[in-house]
Image (cartoon, rainbow, N blue to C red):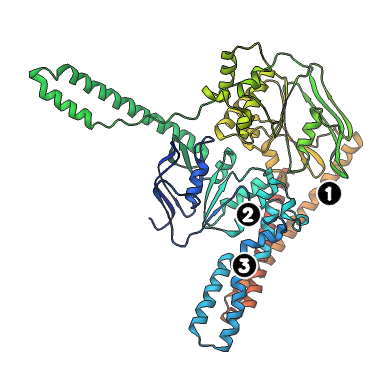
Amino acid sequence: MGYAMLLELKDIEKGFGAAEVLRGISAGIERGDRVGLIGANGTGKTTLLRILCGQSAPDGGSVSLSAGAVVGYLEQTGGLVPTETVYEAMRHAFDPALAAMARLETLQRQLAAAPGDAALAAQIAACTAVIDAADAYNMDHLIKRVLSGMAFPPETWQKQAGVLSGGEQTRLRLARLLLERPDLLVLDEPTNHLDLATMQWLEGYLQGYRGAVLVVSHDRYFLDAVCTRIWELRGKTLTVYRGNYSAYLPLRQAADERRQKQHDADVAKAAKLQDYVDRNLVRASTTKMAQSRRRQLEKLEITAAPEPEPHALDFRFEYDIEPYEELVILRDLAVRVGARTLFEGLTHTVRRGERLVIAGPNGAGKSTLLQVLDGTRRPSAGTVRLGSGARCGVFTQQQAPRTGRVIDAVWNRYPRMTELEVRSHLARFGFRGEEVFKSCTALSGGELARLRFAELALERPNLMLLDEPTNHLDIYMRESLTAALSAYTGTLLLVTHDRYLMQALGCPILSIEDGKTILYRSLEALLARDAAPAPQKAAQPAAGAERAAYGREQRRHRAEVRARIKAVEEEIESLGAHIVELENELNDPALLRDYLAVRDKSDELDDARFHQQELFDEWEALLAEQETFGE
């Protein structure tokens, strides 16, 4: 194993009963690697992760972990004590360091009584190393920083873990694992249940993570942002590609083409040798040459053809009835849940053929808005009207339980279709062969989603309302769905956190933020919102008097921005000098003998550096905003 290698897999084999899952898996992870593990659903990704983390033993081969290295695995369920608060759950990440701190106090008292005891000094050094490795003196600051980044505001820190939703519990487990800072961080679908802001924070955190990262994800945008290497699991074997997901695609295609070309050449050579042997082996004048050719044929190793890719699904959504031009009309719409106002004053019109993405933090009211649009929920105020000729098709996050077989789900609704027609239609959505006779109660979340898309295609709606349509889908089905929705000429309103889908659709995004609705022209505008001037609100144009006041307000705002830039620059300079002073103090040998003083100064230095970064971020945002003024 190389010096920088953290983990090495060699010839891993794994099966369940007679079914072979993994064959000849060999790969390594070095310090600093950001590896994305991809593959179709059911190819063995989770099985490989469990072997890698020591939770399952391979049938053959070996897993080698660098001495002293720690692997942290994001469990999908469990690991939280229901009665503990969010903050208490996070403190468990520092349990070894907290135990070392308690032990350190005892050891220091003992050393004071026996100053020359070398064994005590060694134990103190070991405890200090554990504390420093965890940065435990900055524990509270680190906990608060990670909780805030993972969308847990201060008012949630005293909530019990048992009352959190499934998505919140997943985020809390991920937040605690990030604090544990293992040498190898293994994450299985970490972006599930995360909103856009939290995904962006997580991407930034993983990009700067000091250890290595192995992540299973079907989120193409996330894989492009985080990964520097792709492991593709296909046909029970693993192939490693350098670069992110976008770099992997052409590399895989080129590798498949080279392998197919070599396979064809080997097969042609074998056929030529066999033909010569067949024609000449019985002829006395050429028998020796034929025997030589036969020996060549026996030694010839034919390159295996590339494993077939997961079935590329080719389907479309079409409609028959052309609806009225103004198809979805919202007027002064408000939705309240109990005493809480999700949003109010929403006025917007979606015209025939337009697309609109509905985005926002978890719990902002996106799915609730979609329920108001499809008529399953009444608005608290205002009106929703669909234009004449609207024919609506709905996809919900959680599909209703089904009975019967997959083929029955379609055939019962469309009895005039022949069995061949039903099976051909289902095959376009990945249900092939005997899979059409599978019980609906045994379908996974991704299979239920594909079945619902098959039904939607037959419904032929001219208006589709989709709530998180890419959830539960593997990366290949996501790309097929993205292509189908991009080609759809009807009207599309969808709730999604899938940035690749947003980017492909290239449509406006209605964001629900803090009880307000804001319309962004594109994904790029949404992602840059913190550094951009106030976006267009999803409402009617301002009145004449408001437009006149707008110019005065802009001039006042420009002056405020210039003044704030100057103040931030002065604060950055002053804080920089203070940081230098603190660093000099921490290098003073006299201070180093007092661990409490070192802890306090370290806390102060960390807070100063954190505040300095906040100031730099604000300064860059202010400069970007000033540039929009044309100055």
Reading the image, the residue beneath label 2 is: 79
Pinpoint residue 241: horizontal percent, then vertical percent: 45, 41
User: Which picture quadrant has residue 478?
Assistant: top right
Q: CA distance from mark 1 to mark 2?
A: 53 Å
Reading the image, the residue beneath label 3 is: 136
Q: What is the three-letter code of the residue carrying label 2?
A: Gly
User: Which picture quadrant has residue 392?
Assistant: top right
Q: CA distance from mark 1 to mark 3?
A: 46 Å
Q: Earlier in the sequence, mark 2 or mark 3?
A: 2
Q: Check disc 2 and report its element: helix, strand or loop.
A: loop
Reading the image, the residue beneath label 1 is: 556
Q: Nearer the viewer, mark 2 or mark 3?
A: 2
Pinpoint residue 243: horizontal percent, then vertical percent: 48, 42
* Vertical side of 40 occupied by 136: above or below: below
57 sits to left or right of 180: left
Q: Nearer the viewer, mark 1 or mark 2?
A: 2
Q: Nearer the viewer, residue 67 or 502?
A: 67
* Vertical side of 195 occupied by 564: above or below: below
Q: Nearer the viewer, mark 1 or mark 3?
A: 3
Pinpoint residue 207: horizontal percent, then vertical percent: 56, 51
Residue 612 visible in the picture? no
Q: What is the three-letter code of the residue carrying label 1?
A: Arg
Q: Check disc 3 and report its element: helix, strand or loop.
A: helix
593 sits to left or right of 308: right
Q: Nearer the viewer, residue 547 or 18?
A: 18
Q: Earlier in the sequence, mark 1 or mark 2?
A: 2
